[in-house]
Image (cartoon, rainbow, N blue to C red):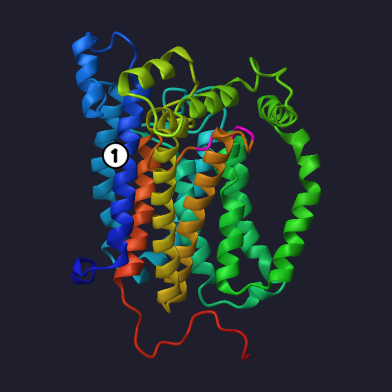
Amino acid sequence: MSALLRPNLGWVALLAAGMLTVIGIVAIDASDLKPGDVRETAEAREAADATGGAMGFLSSAAAKKQAVFFVVALVAMLITAVPHFRLIGPTACPLMGLTLLALVLVVLPFMPREFVPVRGGARRWFNFQVITVQPSEVAKIVFLLALAWYLRFRANYRTLRGLLVPLLITFVPMGLIVIEPDLGTSLIFLPVLFAMLVAAGAKLKHLIAIVLIGLSLTPGLYFLLRPHQQSRINAALLQWQDDESERHGAGYQGYMAQMLVGAGGTTGNPPSHARNLLHYNHLPERHNDMIFAVICTRWGLMGGVAVLGMYVLLVTVGVVSAAQTQDPFARLIAVGVVAVIFTQVFVNVGMTVGLLPITGLTLPFISYGGSSLVVNFLMVGLLINVAARRPIVMARPAFEFGRR
């Protein structure tokens, strides 16, 4: 515990994550409010706009819940920050087994809807009345722990045959998540696998060969997608060709997100005007998947860049922490956390500004959701854990294969 109290890079990661979460709560509050929810006199609007605050801060139920989730997430972070990472390692495989069991149960069609609700045709949640848990969110952190624990002292993954086990560890949870269906979350696993294998010393020629094979199979996988997933891809392709035929169909969400991003201009809009823009333009999923559009509407390009800067700071802390530690397991943990956060931010922002198809992937720390926020802070706890434990003097460098 004393190691955590010493100044270390983990504090920077916690500060960045906390600031992103506060921004998220404010954005959720703005996106969830509707005209008439709070007193809208001219004096109230002028006072709110003059101070730069939102009228009736935390007036929405979603923002209040997210604030509670924030407190819960900070407490949960201690689970991964306090115990030494060497004590966390042996729990990775049992946790992976429990997570796979949860992913199987959540997709079974005979599970009662009171316990496994169906929302938008997807089965992703366990409803425990007091709290709702999304196993696919938990799977992200359990997956990177299990993969790091497997790779820590092995060298067999430097052959093509040796890559089979890491691929199996990846594709089993990934496949179960696709069945839910949750294509967005499933897309995280492959970049994380690639990053962790590179950090562990796998041969790039093997990884590049696997990537090329995967890309060659991608067109065939298109026909395995659900109809709504295919329509989103089609809408994105039409948009890239300046074809607006799906503007009011499958491409509606993406079009509205880009329009609101543009409406923010350079410095954004006053709170009352931003709130009205968000309400009357009917952006679907504006409090979770499309929250970056809300941020740009309210704070403009400068606000969007500031948010991305905090993510860069968070990723930098992870990369530097990975480089400083000599412990293989700790290094892979840090790389895995960075890969998860970077992938989510890249995909979410990319789909919001029209560079990628809509996938339903949330923005870390900012989008609404208790399971997501708790898991994100568990990952921050891992970064704190790695950054706080100083490297052992005279320790053997991790993943050095050149002299063998």
365 vs 78, nearest the viewer: 365
Which picture quadrant has residue 297?
A: top left
Q: Which amino acid does label 1 sit on?
A: Val
Q: How many marks?
A: 1
Residue 122, percent from left and from top: 55, 28
Q: Judge whether 354 appears above or below 384 on screen.
A: above
Q: Which residue is drawn at 52% across and 42% down?
A: 103
Indicate the quadrant containing the N terminus: top left, top right, bottom left or bottom right.
Answer: bottom left
Q: Is mark 1 on a helix, strand or loop?
A: helix
Magenta region? 357-361
- In this figure, which residue is indicated by the disc labeled 1? 22
Quadrant location, the C terminus:
bottom right
- Find residue 15 and report its horizontal and vertical position in percent: 28, 53
Q: Where is residue 221 in the image (x, y as percent from the top left)?
A: 76, 40
Q: Does the magenta stretch include residue 360?
A: yes
Where does the image place residue 171, in percent across and percent down from the top left?
A: 63, 52
